[in-house]
Image (cartoon, rainbow, N blue to C red):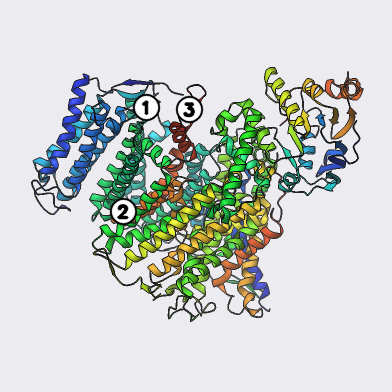
Amino acid sequence: MHDLPQQLANGLILGALYGLVAIGYTMVYGIVQLINFAHGEIVMVGGFGALTAYLALPGGTTLWLALPLMLIAGILVSTLTAVAAERFAYRPLRNAPRLAPLITAIGLSIFLQQLVFSFYPDAKKARVFPKIPGDPFSLGSVTIQRSDLFLIIAAPLCMLALGWFVTRTRSGRAMQATSQDPDTAKLMGIDTDRIIVMAFAIGAAFAAVAAVAYGLRSGQVDFRMGFILGLKAFTAAVLGGIGNIYGAMLGGIALGLAEALATGYIQHLPGMHLFGGGAWKDVWAFVLLILVLLVRPQGLLGERVADRA
Amino acid sequence: MTTTETAPVIPLPARAATTLTGLGALATAASAALPWTWTSDFPGDLTYTGAPAGLQWLAIAAGVLTLVLLLATQGTPGLRWAAPTRSNNAVLLAATGALAVAAYSVTAITVELGGLANLEPGGWILAGGGLLTVLGALGLPLDRRTAVPVRILDKRLFLLLPAAPLGWYGAHAIPDDQPVAPVMTALSGALAIAAGAVLLLQLGHLANSWLRLGKADRPLPPPRRLPSWVEVLVIIAAFGAGLYAITFGIDTEYGELFTGYLLLAALVAAALTRSGLITRLRTLTVQHRPVTTGAAFAAAASFPFTQSSDQYTSVATNILIFATVALGLNIVVGLAGLLDLGYVAFLGVGAYAAALVSGSPASPIHVQFPFWAAMLTGAAVSMVFGVLIGAPTLRLRGDYLAIVTLGFGEIFRITMLNLNGTTGPKVTNGSNGIPRIPDLEILGFDLGKPHTVAGIELGRFSNYYLLMLLVTALVVLVFARVGNSRIGRAWVAIREDETAAEAMGINGFRLKLLAFALGACLAGLAGTVQAHVSYTVTPDQYTFADALPPNSAFLLAAVILGGMGTISGPLVGATLLFLIPKKLEFLSDYQLLAFGAALIVLMRVRPEGLIPNRRRQLEFHEAATPAPPTGEPTALTKAGA
Amino acid sequence: MTTAAAPLLDVTGVTMRFGGLTAVNDVSLTVGEGEIIGLIGPNGAGKTTFFNCLTGLYVPTEGSVRYRGTLLPPKPHLVTQAGIARTFQNIRLFANMTVLENVLVGRHTRTREGVFSAILRGPGYHRAEREGREKAMELLAFTGLAEKADHLARNLPYGEQRKLEIARALASEPGLLLLDEPTAGMNPQETRAAEELVFAIRDKGVSILVIEHDMRFIFNLCDRTAVLVQGEKIVEGDRETVQTDERVITAYLGAPLEGTTPAVTETDQ
């Protein structure tokens, strides 16, 4: 157990990444009760947007200068994609039966993946993403990759900004009102269409931040990266209590920790020596989701909602 | 509710329009007797005089059908049965079919052989005939809406039109050695495609408000009572024709013919629906249900006898597997309203279970179950997984189920990959899968060997086709009988309004679990056959989305495209979704892209699918029973429209 | 007040709290065999919440609900099985099913045919299905919908949808029928027809508990009426008792100076 601090640090960093993506699911779900299945792909296009900005810069630009520009490009691409998706794919279905927008979301997810796969140059395999150069840091027994610094700084900043936005600004409060009761919010003069677009846009911006963090961490982006990431992030959103933004981050961190610990320690449990390591971490994340749904279906921070008769 | 009128689009004297349509249809059909092109390089060899081939048969079919429908709507004695509604729109649809075949053939010849010079007189007659038919049909009195306002797209979208060429120049201004250059070229290409789409969409809106084609309420005259045996013969003939049409589609040898076939089939289906013929047929089948079921089964079972080699029976077998699983999914999604995004995993569970007990040398369990036992094992194991996944999630809101099943589908694949002896216990051989699954032997009948029945040799795939057909029949039986019973009604009630259903004494959780487990069980059953058909089971066969069916996304799409809650819907949907990627291999790179886009468009345009659900069936039902003239059947027909 | 030895429905001290909000506070009520009991109160008085406590949709925070002397299980489908059926304030039919199928769904608890029986279709299945259809058609005839048995529920006019909801509830062969604002949105003629229907149901031996806004409807109909205001039962009795009770008048018309006048015929959402 001597590497416990290291595993915890790994879990925290991974969890913050899940949390950033989970925010997008939770915000959209909180307001329109839609699982925006294509959110993973919003992350992915953000990654490719950032990569494009990097490629467009003259060779030899230091990453410290490139990173902000990449971030802006990623956010731009993600947000535009998400807003366009909302406007042209989801909005016309707002009063359709429950299954219809979900299927649209699946279609959109496949469409975006294939769009990048077919038309982004050399995207048939993973494309190299820059890493922050330099040796890893050491804090006591914990080693942290330099590329993870971005996430360690960006995730808390994003959460602070979002918390401030939701509680302190007019738009944020309108957003909360809409998620509580869209009809009443409309009667109170809130432009719910605008609020919904805003939820998609904020989620997409966070997705782009996550995409850059993912790219820096793994040194590559590929057209399929959104699928598993999206699945994990949705799990995180459910774990934390869907609809609750702090819950999304908490769920992400819980999931990240669980994954790191499962990767590190499951094989030491009696009789489980064959089920540990990275190969099984997705399985354990899924098992965790099932367990949480059994014990606390409303999630860690969620509230129980009763069906009104 | 829009009002309709009956008026031609192109003002022509009635007689002139009829003559023009008829002549055009004749010319289209007759052109097939002449060569369309001079070289046999074009697939199908369309160079002979008096010997139609490939696409030329489609032209004949389109021409003849248009002519028959035209004569029927004109009230020609002896042909009136073909168009009970007398709607000229049916003629127009058939004429459009003729034009589509003509336009597609001429374009394909011109593009593939390089230039109009490659057309022989037959090709020109075809083009002229197709055009004439549609022009004439537009002059017939058509059912039209009285006013269709011109729809203009969001003005901001038109910014794309100048943006596309600008983007093009911009992309070319970047030197090629810049790493970003290919990205910019791709982006400008995407811009051009988007601009083209906007242009097409706007043109479509303009054409729509010019044509104003609509559907009028045309009451069907009560059907003439025929002797019962004649009605039975009609049903058998209809299924014979259906078998012929489907066989033609499966047997198409090259993409051009399949594309033409698909275009014509879609328009013919629309034309026959509008002519009222399909309604008539449905009425008959409702009256003779046992005969219908028997005829459908016999038609399906005679497919292998129409084939000279195993080449297309293997396609047909895989279609059956896909369609059967789609029908199983339809119990879960269509009846009970539960969205299962990992359904293919249950097929996989069944297939792996069957493979493990098949006696394959690669299986760590060295047993060989008889087939019935393997089938039961596959179905049972699949059902157990269904209950394990369903029990914790079905108590919650439906959306959770969607994500948990999606996760399960993915986890199943990962687990099968990991049970390879290195990263986990050695069970499945990881990505290599379980190969060399022996052929089945049922009651001493070896399905791996060809057998001769009634003078026709049935190969390995024919044997499996017939076995699979039995499984399909079983699933159809289960779907039909359970769907129309106390349990099925409870499922639909839950789908419609779960709170109200519970207030009616329905145990929502238990019934949802039942639907979920039954669906899993049926998929597992199909999986046991699939394992033997394909010799090998590998984890990659069971993914969420892939270019080839069956995978979870395609299964769901088959159900939705076909029509949720119906039996024929998923069967039609699965057939289309299997054949299109198979036959149009030139599309292969963009197949999934098109698939994704199609799902989005379909949900906006026709969320109820190709085969409409109960509402329409009800319409037929009411048309069949002579209802008193009072009451409100009109309200109902409109709702079905 | 009919004091039978054991009332059909016996509600004692039911309290329902949502977080800090007490929607229903210590309400007791009995319904005897063959009685029609009314429950009125201004908007937001907790009538529907009280109903939901009876039908197992909510589990009361405190108190107990007994039906024929046994404690009711806290699950809607078990409550229906025990013999209490309900309708909904905002009609909740199975819109894409036919009228007949809607009623057949109502018979769910009174039949036992399962999956295997449905697949095998033995004589037992056919008998059960035939009986079900006969009973359902009887109910449709009773509510005057027999002509429309094959129509889709969604295509019925509003008044007939209400009738269908009642027929569907009766299909579960209840001893007690709970009606949640059966005349909401009806015109006077339709309301009168609804009255007739409720009496006819009572004559079939089914007791009725009805929520209403329409005072005239309630007083024509009910043997006793309870008034719920802000989650508390302030009075219960016959027409005279209720109409002359000052607290009721205050609740409906407002105390002269408080200025709160909830509309009397509006539906609460």
Label 1 marks which chain's residue?
B
Tell me the amino acid under the disc marked 3: Ala
Q: Residues within 10 Å of mark 1 (few under 14, many from 20)?
A: few
Numbered circle sitting on residue B44:
none
The residue closer to the viewer here, B110 or C196, is C196
Per the model, the C-alpha gap separating discs 1 and 2 is 45 Å
Residue behind mark 1: B221
Q: Is residue B396 visible?
A: no
Secondary structure at badge 3 equals loop
Q: Where on the picture, by quarter, is residue B155?
A: top left
Numbered circle sitting on residue B587:
2
Q: Where on the picture, by quarter, is residue C263?
A: top right
Q: Is residue C155 above or below residue B365?
A: above
Same chain under badges 1 and 2? The reply is yes
Mark 1 or 2: the one toward you: 1
Per the model, the C-alpha gap separating discs 3 and 1 is 13 Å
Residue behind mark 3: B627
Q: Which part of the image, by quadrant, shows the N terminus of chain A? A: bottom right
Q: Is residue B287 above or below residue B473?
A: above
Mark 3 or 2: the one toward you: 3
